[in-house]
């Protein structure tokens, strides 16, 4: 079976309305995450010669991505709900969807806080912004 190309992956942000509308975040570059993790707690008793662990909480970690920053793009910078800037400045948990370009259009939906927005303006380059989303709560994967 051949590998599936990642070009065409979409990252969408919800507007928080009763009937939520998702808008594709414009000009997204490389995307990393989510990174699924199961926490454990040591539960070794004096009766055991081996360390023992019990599972605790699940985490989906962070999603990080770069955008080719455009201050006129309403998903990048706006004082209205539905922009990355608005979500961070107002400490709003937004719903996001990561839509993979595979034949089944797998979708990963999650709520997250925008915890990082880092603008970069190289002398020889284009305006970019690195974005960090901290996932909060369960993740839904639709194949």
Image: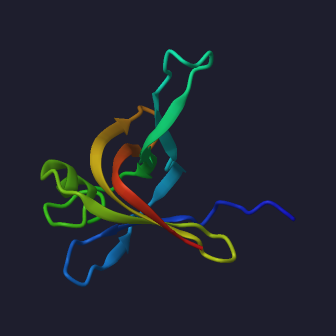
Which of the image's four quarters has the N terminus?
bottom right
Where residue 29 sits: x, y (%)? Answer: 51, 52
The outermost residue toward the bottom is 19
Name the residue located 18 percent from the left edge and 66 percent from the top edge: 81
Left of 80 or right of it: where is 55? right
Q: Nearer the viewer, residue 51 or 136?
A: 51
Quadrant for the C terminus in the image: bottom right
Location of residue 127 (image quadrant): top left
Q: Is residue 107 left or right of residue 92?
A: right
| x and y percentages locating residue 17 in the rendered image | 19, 78
Say whether residue 58 is left or right of residue 6: left
Q: Residue at x 50, y 42 (%)?
A: 37
Q: Is residue 114 above or below residue 15?
A: above
> In this orientation, which residue lies closer to the viewer: 88 or 143?
143
Q: Is residue 59 left or right of residue 32?
A: left
Q: Is residue 11 visible?
A: no
Residue at horizontal 37 percent and vertical 64 percent from the top: 96
Name the residue located 43 percent from the left edge and 60 percent from the top edge: 139
Residue at far right of view = 1
Q: How is the model colour-coded?
A: rainbow
User: Image height check: is 40 above or below 33?
Assistant: above
Q: Is residue 139 visible?
A: yes
In terms of depth relative to the viewer, which is nearer, 62 or 5? 62
Q: Position of residue 12 (x, y in %)?
A: 40, 67
Residue situated furthest front in the rendering: 47
């Amino acid at each position: 079976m051949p590998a599936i190309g990642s070009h065409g992956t979409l990252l969408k942000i919800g507007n928080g309305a009763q009937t939520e509308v998702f808008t594709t975040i414009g000009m997204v570059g490389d995307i990393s995450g989510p990174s699924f993790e199961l926490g454990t707690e040591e539960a070794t008793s004096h009766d055991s010669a081996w360390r023992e662990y019990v599972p605790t909480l699940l985490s989906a970690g962070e999603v990080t991505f770069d955008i080719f920053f455009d201050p006129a793009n309403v998903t990048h910078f706006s004082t209205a709900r539905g922009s990355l800037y608005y979500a961070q400045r107002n400490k709003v948990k937004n719903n996001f969807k990561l839509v993979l370009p595979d034949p089944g259009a797998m979708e990963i939906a999650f709520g997250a806080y925008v915890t990082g927005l880092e603008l970069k303006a190289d002398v020889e380059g284009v305006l970019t912004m690195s974005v960090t989303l901290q996932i909060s709560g369960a993740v839904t994967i639709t194949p």
